[in-house]
């Protein structure tokens, strides 16, 4: 009997799971490889350290190398005007908990942290209130950040990208 015919009939829950996994395998969902950008960012072997006595995203030992690797993914891309699709891919990576080659206190850090460091080395955003005063913003999480912090940062930066309210360094 064909798989699709089996899936069309009423079958126990394990049968449904089998059908879903089979469909995912057939479409490649289970075998997706990280993008070239994510692979390149994950391979940078930098370390996060202290800045003014506190752990910091901005104190990343290989930030310039990281930014160069990111920009090299799109030849002809300049640091002063990175394309939105490159920024979007970095933002999309914020909540990726996969380990990277980068470390903090000799422990691998999530890929999302390294993507965040790359993005904030290229662009910045100043969230302001109604009077124009700069305010706290979810897009700049405290280091070390939790997965929840990084999801909030991702949402905040996606809005900034949509509204084009970021500035390049």
Image (tube, rainbow, N blue to C red):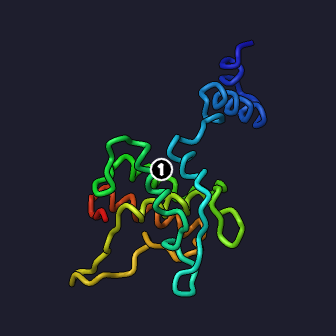
Which type of secondary structure does the marked residue at label 1 adopt? Answer: helix
Q: How many marks?
A: 1
Q: Is residue 82 above or below residue 54?
A: above
| Residue corresponding to mark 1 | 69
Q: Is residue 128 left or right of residue 17?
A: left
Q: Residue 28: percent from the left, percent from the top?
A: 61, 30
Above or below residue 41? Residue 169 is below
Which residue: 48% across, 72% down? 58
Residue occupying image coordinates x 70% and y 19%: 3
Query: Closer to the camera, 40 or 150?
Result: 40
**Quick check: 155 left or right of 57?**
left
Label 1, residues with CA under 10 Å away: few <14, some 14-19, many ≥20: some
Looking at the image, residue 10 lies above or below residue 41: above
Residue at x 46%, y 53% (from the top left corner): 90
Q: Which quadrant, please, contains the C terminus? A: bottom left
Q: Nearer the viewer, residue 72 or 13?
A: 72
- Quadrant location of residue 134? bottom left
Residue 48 image position (x, y, % from top left): 59, 70
Extreme residue in the bottom direction:
53
Residue 97 location (% of width, % of height): 63, 57
The x, y position of residue 160, in whole percent, is 33, 62
Return the residue found at the far left.
Answer: 131
67 horizontally vs 78: left or right:
right
Q: Is residue 159 above or below residue 15?
A: below
Residue placed furthest toward the top: 1
Q: Quadrant of residue 132?
A: bottom left
Q: Residue at x 64, y 31 (%)?
A: 24
- Camera-side residue of 55 and 65: 65
Quarter of the image where the N terminus is located: top right
């Amino acid at each position: 009997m064909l798989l699709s015919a089996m899936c069309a009939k009423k079958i126990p829950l394990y049968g449904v799971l089998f059908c879903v996994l089979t469909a995912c395998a057939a479409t490649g969902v289970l075998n997706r490889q990280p993008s070239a950008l994510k692979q390149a960012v994950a391979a940078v072997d930098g370390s996060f350290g202290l800045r003014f006595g506190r752990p910091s995203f901005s104190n990343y030992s290989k930030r310039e190398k990281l930014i160069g690797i990111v920009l090299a993914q799109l030849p002809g891309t300049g640091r002063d005007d990175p394309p939105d699709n490159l920024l979007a891919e970095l933002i999309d990576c914020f909540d990726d908990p996969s380990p990277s080659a980068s470390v903090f206190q000799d422990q691998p850090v999530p890929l999302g942290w390294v993507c965040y460091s790359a993005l904030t080395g290229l662009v910045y955003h100043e969230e302001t209130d109604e009077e124009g005063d700069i305010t706290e913003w979810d897009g700049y999480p405290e280091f070390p950040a939790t997965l929840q912090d990084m999801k909030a940062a991702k949402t905040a930066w996606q809005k900034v990208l949509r509204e084009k309210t970021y500035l390049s360094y």
